Structure formats: structure tokens, C-alpha cells
Amino acid sequence: MSVTFKGNAVDLSGNVLNVGDSAPKVELVAGDLSIKSVGGASGKYQIINVVPSLDTGVCAIQTRTFNQRAASLPNAEVFVISLDLPFAQGRFCSTEGIDKVVALSDFRAKVFGQAYGVVLAGSPLEGLLTRAVFVVDPNGKIVHKEIVSEITTEPNYDAALSAVK
């Protein structure tokens, strides 16, 4: 699969996941350097909001929007995942008032990107995660997937939110 970055095609690497597939359970690093898992059955919906870096305008907008719109959903956990260091994620969340979205980093093992098929390959952003949203139901099945076709644009928030019942 490929996406575009400023109109130029960029390939993605990793496993291709589709709606109906089991969401791989992956361990990521939280702001306090503890380990937090996403994917798999958790008893709640999981909105997994994936961004290249919180240090960019569109990624910041995406995270603020999910903080405002999705965090009030009952029976849902909302995550933002990037390769940013947990310290940088913490500063961003503190500065931006992000208090309902859990920031997690794939910096240590870099397994999330491969497990979910969202690693950018062959571009100036090679090695970062592409912009994507996955919604996982309480039983661990993917019920919504959006790999944003142009990395510099926002995802379809309404489609992701409507997947949470």
C-alpha cells in the first residue's frame, strides 16, 4: 500500500490489517516510561490515533480534535501513537491541554508500526509512522481503519467516531 506526502507516492511497510481482523496487541511506552498495551481485547473500544510526529501542525490538530470529540465517548479509550519520545509527548500534551488522550511512543521497540502496517518507507519521512486511525472493538476486532491517503491532511473524524457504538 502507498500514501502520498505532498503529492509524492510513499510506500508503507509492515503487516496489512483490514476491518474484521484481530488487532495485534502491542506494548508501547507511556509518558512515565511504563509499558502500556494497545490492541487486543480490552473490554472497551480503542481509538488508535496514529501520527508521524506531535511536533507538526496537522498532527497537533488531529490530537486536539480527538481529545475534544472522542474522549467523551462512553466505553472508549483514546490513544495517540508516534515515534516521538515520551518526554516530548508529555510536553505537547501539557502545553496543549491534552488530558483525555493517552500519548504512547513506539520509539523503543518500533513494533507498532510493523504490526499495523503504518511505517513510511522511501521518503523524507522514512521510518516514521503514517497518519492513520484504527478503531478496535471491546473484543479486539478492528471495526474501522483509515490510512489517510495524503499524510498532510486530517483523517475522517466522523467515520472513526461513528465506529464506536
Image (tube, helix red, strand yellow):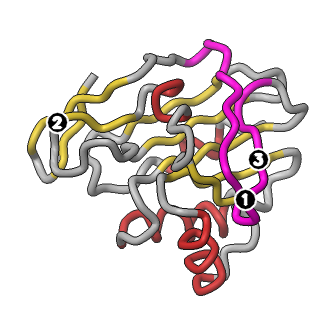
Residue at numbered disc 3: 35
Residue 108 drawn above or below residue 9: below
3 and 1 marks in contact (CB < 8 Å) = no
Seen from this angle, which residue lies furthest bottom? 95
Q: From the viewer's perspective, is the residue at label 3 or at label 2 nearer? A: 3
In three-dimensional space, the C-alpha distance between marks 3 and 2, rounded to whole angstroms, equals 30 Å
**How far is disc 2 from disc 1 in space, using C-alphas?**
30 Å
Along the line of sight, the residue nearer the viewer: 99 or 108: 108
Could you say where residue 45 lies in the image, as x and y percent from the top left?
78, 37
Screen quadrant of the N terminus:
top left
Q: Which residue is mark 2?
A: 122
Which tag is nearer the camera, tag 2 or tag 1?
Answer: 1
**The disc label shown at residue 33, or none:** 1
Task: Give the amino acid at mark 1.
Answer: Leu
Of label 2 and label 1, which has the lower sequence position?
A: 1
Identify which amino acid the numbered label 3 is placed on.
Ile
Locate residue 27: give its quadrant: top right
